[in-house]
Image (spheres, coloured by chain):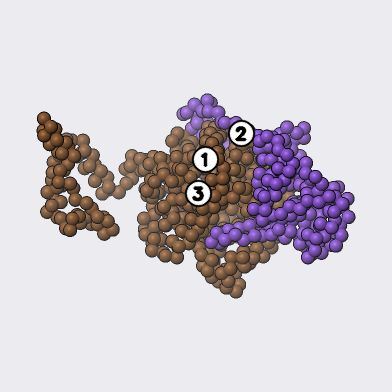
Amino acid sequence: MNSTRENIMSRIRRNLTAVDYATIEREKSLQQSNPESYEMLHKQFNDALEKVGGRVVRCTKKELPVILSQIFSKTDRVCVESTPYLHDISYEGFSLEGEPVQSEGGITTCDALIAETGTVILSGGENKKKVLSLITRTHCVIARPEQYVSTLEEYFARLQKSDVDWTHKTSSLTFITGTSRTADIEKILIKGMHGPRELIVVLVGG
Amino acid sequence: MHLNANKFKAHSKEKLHDKQLRKNLLNATYSALAARAAVVDEITNWEELRNRAYSVKRHVIGHLAQYLEEFERNAVSHGIKVLWAETADEANELVAQIARKRNARLVVKSKSMVTEEIGLNKYLEKQNIEVVETDLGEYIVQLNDEPPSHITAPALHLSRSQIGELFSSKLNTEYTDDPGELAGIARKILREKFFSAQMGISGANFLIADTGSIVIIENEGNARFVTTLPKTHIVITGIEKILPAISDLPLFLRLLPRSATGQLMTSYVSVIQSPRKSKDTDGPDEIIVILVDNNRSAILGDSVMREVLYCIRCGACSNICPVYQNVGGHAYGSVYTGPIGSILTPSLYPIEQATVLPFASSLCGSCSEICPVKINIHHLLLYQRSRVIEKRLSPLVERFIFSVWKTVMMSEFLYRLALRSSRIIARLWKRKGSLSVPVWSATRDFPLPANESFHEWWESQQIKNN
């Protein structure tokens, strides 16, 4: 095994010495965009998400139970991620029993919202069910205004600057942009191929 | 996969007469190109992005050993196992060993070109392991027992009614040609497979050196299932997939989805850091990355061909290639199709087995123009042609014609003699204003030589003026 690795590595080194690559530097990553106002970010995110078949609902924390019962009016099987923020909400109109597998709807929090592309970023972490955002037909994300970031470049810049080493803390980051889809048959768009057919971002406060 | 590239001419002739195939190809490639154009036109600095991506790729390939070591160190520190394979067989055997040890009977797979390249599915099936492709397009071609015909759209060569017939015959379902219903049939079957599989196999779009991340891009969600539900997740990928830093990822996420499917961003991007942590409620217990060389490190030694390793597998060059648009992917007889396949295959495999592919191009240059990482594809096609010629692998007749041509062009006397005699011969053979040349004249005219050559005309002008 080790010899395989060494064989490959020594071949790479030998074959690269022919040209002096030491001088080749890569261009630095793009400039970060300027901070924008919340309203601008919100509009950008909303437009981008609508383009890929998702939608955004804005409400106060008080209105949240009603909004959620409207979203899940057609099903009584909803599963909620077990994070403290979502535990404090008093859910109405549907039961929260059962595993993700049997659920029609899934409610999760998120780490960030990328305004430019309408992307929701989820991270794997304690007590978070990764399949919840994948296995259900309707995925509902509860987000807060301060989670808006203008671009992916800025998101990573923030992660790198943070005191917590995210590379060890989380088992994965998942960027979700719209619903699960395929165009493998005659380039015709089909929603909900393996994952959710519906993506709703509920923005609480702001 | 078994290489069948030298039969390109015979294959393409056959494909050209398949009207259904050509209709499917034009429909698919044109709609892909239109979708791409719409989202590329939206951004003003597309050229700048391409230049940056080229410089990043050039840098990382030039420092490959160092970045591979950095990736390995970081991935291992998160609990990911990293293995190495020099050849296709070695990689296949590593996977089979892992499967045997864990007693895996069912493996679910998400799309991976490298596993096609090494022929993993057949290898595992021989060991009585059931392998199921879960990307809809890959699932379709697996049912049809054929290789994918496009890097990013594997079943692009089939129409909905062909897929409907395939499903009803192989899956015993009622015939339908409704894409939504067909997708539904596949969804139901594959959902069960995700839950019962002991092992998931995926490729990787990028490996990030400074964070030890595995990045997988997709739209369907099948790769998320494959990398989340089974206890063991194996990542099989080529050593060239490295990016130096996570801060380089956004740039490539601007380029790849736009070029491949005309999206600003794919539905899902998974950045995988580690197996399930102690308090995680799901995720695999182990992640094993197999870094496959299979001749890539040898390509590094060719300072011109090295550029082929910059490819991010978007498939845009296939979509825009007039040759691909007419013959489709299967004619190439290689896993890697279209213009990029025509330069990659003769370097990945012994060139003797793919001498025809570098010539399967009109050299129009559209591939180089559309490439998001600015690989100079049509120049590399010419370079591969020169390798074929230098190794004296072109057909005997062709070599003879060119050696005569060379002799004539190098002697003024022979050149003038050839010109004059060609005019005399042409006049003798003349039919209705054009020459009749076997094969050539069947589809186009062979114009007569002019009555006077430019040299002769010039000389006569000089005499007149004096």
Chain letter of the residue beneath label 3 in the structure image: B
Does the rendering let one see residue B380?
Answer: yes
Viewer-proximal residue, B20 or B313? B20
Colour of chain B in the image: brown
Tell me the residue at 69%/59% (across/down).
A197
Q: Earlier in the sequence, mark 3 or mark 1?
A: 3
Tell me if I can see residue B3 in this picture.
no
Q: Chain A shown in which color?
A: purple
Tell me the number on the disc at residue A29.
Answer: 2
Tell me the residue that label 3 is attached to: B316
Q: Name the residue under label 1.
A: B373
Percent across and percent down for residue A121 are 72, 46
**Label 1 packing within 10 angstroms: few (<14), some (14-19), many (20+):** many
Task: Name the chain under label 2.
Answer: A
| Structural distance between the alpha carbons of marks 3 and 2 | 24 Å
Q: In this view, does B466 lie to the left or right of A17?
A: left
For image coordinates 73% across by 39% down, the residue present is A37
Left or right: B57 as drawn, with respect to B323: right
Provide residue A136's location: percent of width, then percent of height. Answer: 74, 59
Residue placed farthest to the bottom in the image? B174
Horizontal and vertical percent position of residue B101: 67, 51
Residue B162 drawn at (x, y percent) = 51, 67
Separation of residues labelled 3 and 1 (CA atoms): 11 Å
Q: Do labels 3 and 1 share a chain?
A: yes
Asked if marks 2 and 1 fall on the same chain, the answer is no
Q: In which quarter of the image is the C terminus of chain B?
A: top left
Residue at disc 3, secondary structure = helix
Tag 3: residue type? Ala
Q: Is mark 1 on a helix, strand or loop?
A: loop
